[in-house]
Image (cartoon, rainbow, N blue to C red):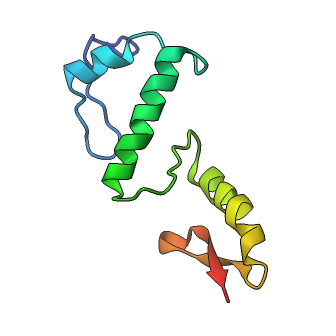
Amino acid sequence: MYGQMSERELLMIPGPTNVDAAVLRALSKPTLPHESLEFVAIFKETLEYLKKVFITNAQVFAISGSGTLALEMARALIGPLLRSRSWTEGCCRQNAPCLTLAK
């Protein structure tokens, strides 16, 4: 019947993508406050895993936001270091705007 959902609906985002039951159970748990000791420990561990993924000892960032937020953060962090260069708006795949670093 239209409007009623069964306990397990087929997820029709690009895919279709079926979500494993273990993932659904994990997502059903209450979220942790970002200032809790448990969250901080998990976040630190995640950053260490990211260093391994990207094979680096440099600082890594996990951003809870859009790609645009990540670009603005990058601009704010490295922009002042690159005074002899300028940011230009270009065109990425599928006509999406993107920022490129020009000499």
Q: Is residue 98 left or right of residue 8?
A: right
Whether residue 6 is visible here, answered yes or no, is: yes
Placement of 96 over or under 19, stated as above or below? below
- The residue at the point 38 percent across, 12 percent down is 28
Q: Quadrant of the N terminus?
A: top left
Q: Position of residue 89 (x, y in %)?
A: 68, 76
Q: How many marks?
A: 0
- The residue at the point 27 percent across, 23 percent down is 23
Q: Residue furthest bottom?
A: 103
Q: Is residue 74 left or right of residue 10?
A: right
Q: Position of residue 62 (x, y in %)?
A: 51, 43
Residue 69 versus residue 10: which sits nearer the camera? 69
Q: Position of residue 69 (x, y in %)?
A: 65, 51
Q: Quadrant of the C terminus?
A: bottom right
Q: Position of residue 98 (x, y in %)?
A: 61, 70
- The residue at the point 55 percent across, 43 percent down is 63
Placement of 24 over or under 94, stated as above or below? above
Q: Quadrant of residue 57?
A: bottom left
Whether residue 32 is visible here, answered yes or no, is: no
Placement of 83 over or under 17, stated as above or below? below
Q: Is residue 43 left or right of residue 34?
A: left
Q: Is residue 54 left or right of residue 22?
A: right
Q: Quadrant of residue 83?
A: bottom right
Residue 27 versus residue 16: which sits nearer the camera? 27
Residue 6 versus residue 52: which sits nearer the camera? 52
Placement of 14 over or under 39, stated as above or below? below
- The residue at the point 63 percent across, 60 percent down is 71
